[in-house]
Image (cartoon, rainbow, N blue to C red):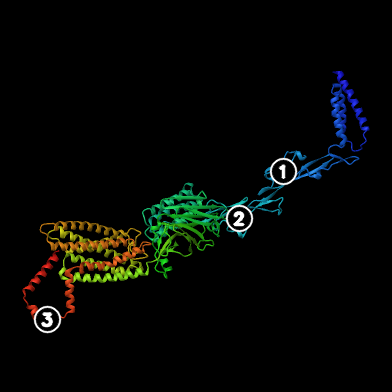
Amino acid sequence: MLRLKVRIRERKKLVKQTHLKILSSTSVRGPTNQSSDHFIEDFVWNYCFLTDMGFGKELLVLGLAFLLVKCKHPCDLGYSSDGKKCVDINECQEHPCGNHSKCFNTNGSYYCQCQDGFRNIHGSKNFTMIKGQCQDTNECNENNNICGQGAYCENLIGSYKCTCQSGYVNVSHVTSPVQCEDINECEAGEINQDICGKKGVCRNVNGSYWCDCPKGYTNYGIQETPCTELGCDSFSADSKPAQSHGGLADILFMMRNSCLALSDPSAAGERKTDGEALLEKLFTATQVILSPGHVNSSEDVSGLLSTVEKSLLLIGPQLKGNRTKMETTETDAEIAVKRGKTPPTGPIHLTNENASLDTDWATAAGTETYPGFALAALLSYKNLEKSVNRSFEELDEQKKDDVNPSFQVFSRVVSIVVSNPSTQNLSNPVNITLKHIQGIEKSPHMHYICAYWNDNGAWSTDGCYQQHSNATHTVCTWKHLSSFAVLMALYPIEHTFGLQVLTKIGLIISLLCLILSILTFKFCRSIQGTRTTIHLHLCICLFMADLIFLAGISQTKPVGGCRFVAAMLHFFFLGVFTWMLLEGVQLYRMVVLVFNANIRPLYLYITGYVTPLVIVIISAIIRPTGYGTDEYCWLSLENGLIWSFFGPVCLVIILNVFFFIITVWRLAQKFASLNPDLSKLHKIRAFTVTAIAQMCILGLMWVFGAFMFAEGTTVVAYIFTILNSLQGALVFMMHCLLSKQVREEYAHFLSCICTPQKKRYSDFSSTNPSSSQSQGSRSGQHTGESQI
């Protein structure tokens, strides 16, 4: 081992000497390259060492190869030869460091450094192209307080930016560095003198402020918004709407308690109710009011709409979510709320099964003092249209130059509520799409209009127009909201001129025939009897009904007069059917009863007039508004009152059918008997035929009359008018002209008028037996007719 070390030491000395000889023999003069020196020295040393170890040949070949390369490129890496010497290469001229970096050249090499605001992804300060890359430094994340108090940091490429937060101001007046100080909003000058409202107390805090609201005011928990007055007194249970409808008092009492709890900062937590619970209570109370049926008066409708709208304005800001939907059996609502320091912008679309609303948040919020929230609500009443299918007086005044239009509510009643207190003249009109209750296409005799329920409790079209309409929907555009119901009205055109002329001519003919019939039944002595009495009063009732129909059916103004006309028509038409029932009873008694077949006149009068009178009085007490409509003075088809007429009519027809069946059956039996009284039976048969024909005409007429005033039934109206005109002529023909005795009376009457009579004493003193027999026979005929 010692000998090996000695040999190695000797070899190193030999290598150094050999190296010096090689350098001294070099012909190239240039900068000494330390790496080249080491190469030669290492090669010689290793060659000598490995030769002793037995690898000399292999190393010699390898060394010669390196020497050839070295001779071809005599300069080291990072240098280039100019023919005389090795010169340093400036690698920075080729920009090897990449973006956001700086290059530094060195002898034989170079190094890179990142610019300010950037750093090497590998962490080292100096790097080369293959050992590094510069990326942005996020100063904001590395130092949270780099911008100081009241400022926020914004990272930039290679730098950062400091900006004062809201509620602070830069007092250094330069962008970097910034010095932010708190703004005292409570003492910021006249522009902010009402920053918390007229009654609010402003309290400054770092970067912001608070508004403390006194009792009766609130900012709904948004402390940086002005205090607004709640107006809890508007929910007083002593108000007029509550007095007119007891159910409204419950809603007002509930909302007043909620309002007082919200406006009292010291109120206990249990007194306050969240918005969703309040909304549910409101709609439950509304359902209690609407579920029994119609709201009786326009005043009650206005009170209900106003109360619900005010309640939604109070409840809306207390809702937790930005969108709330709630549906009951009577209502369907969607409410949208946006909160924030600045008024919201953008479109609003609210919808339910019966309607949709399209507007924007600028319209909902308004341009006045922003209370920190904006609200928009769409509320549909599912059955309220039945209670408001009236009060078209203002529409009638607006259309007074047209041909007497009629109106019908043809959609659900919809209320639009927004937090904007000024909605009388909107700069951006809102669009409301309403779904029709029934799908009916427009026609020349019918079209749709848009209307709203105004402060007077009536429908009006001011400030709105129809944008589009089809069979199922109508789109209305409004320039105001006013927190009232929005609906669609059906506008049918009145009956044609030809129908009016036909009605007048037909009724005049009918009246003339009825007058002749009344005179005949009253003064024709040969036909006097119970049946004639019935016919007389039937004609009187029909005459009065036709006369009132002709003169007053279209006189809808004044309302009281129209209701009186409707009640009189109700009474006399019921009287017609009542006397027709008495005729059926009389025929039944004539066939079935052998003795005492006649009905006492007192019973006839009581049944014929008192019964219709009782029905009319009861109907008027139960539904006084059902008498008379905006189109005609007859019973309303909307509230069920029409059945106070059609119910008795159907009953009369059913009973008469029963009586006529029994009568015909008994007549058939008597005709088949062994000793029939043919004369009497023929008369009863004739009476029965005329009675059945009369019942068919009257019954058929009122089948069409039931639909006469419905929409799109002009043909039905013509049929009803023709049948109504035939009533008087039919009675006159069947009971007068077809009666032989009446014709004889007419002939005798006409002969007395047209032929001069000679007064001779013999006429008074004649005792001709034939004459006496003739008189006896006539008397017998009279007696028999009376008995019949």
Helix or strand or loop: what does disc 2 sit on?
A: helix
Q: Position of residue 481 (x, y in %)?
A: 49, 60
Q: Position of residue 375 (x, y in %)?
A: 51, 54
The nearer-to-camera label among 1 and 3 is 3
Figure quadrant of the N terminus: top right
First in sequence: mark 2 vs mark 3: 2
Q: Position of residue 428 (x, y in %)?
A: 54, 61
For image coordinates 92% across by 27% down, the residue present is 17
- Residue type at the position of mark 3: Lys
Residue tagged 2: 186
Counting the numbered discs, the total is 3
The nearer-to-camera label among 1 and 2 is 1
Residue tagged 3: 759
- 74 relative to 725 in the view: left or right: right
Q: Nearer the viewer, residue 288 or 242?
A: 288
Q: Is residue 217 visible?
A: no
- 783 relative to 84 in the view: left or right: left
Q: Give residue 140's quadrant in the image.
A: top right
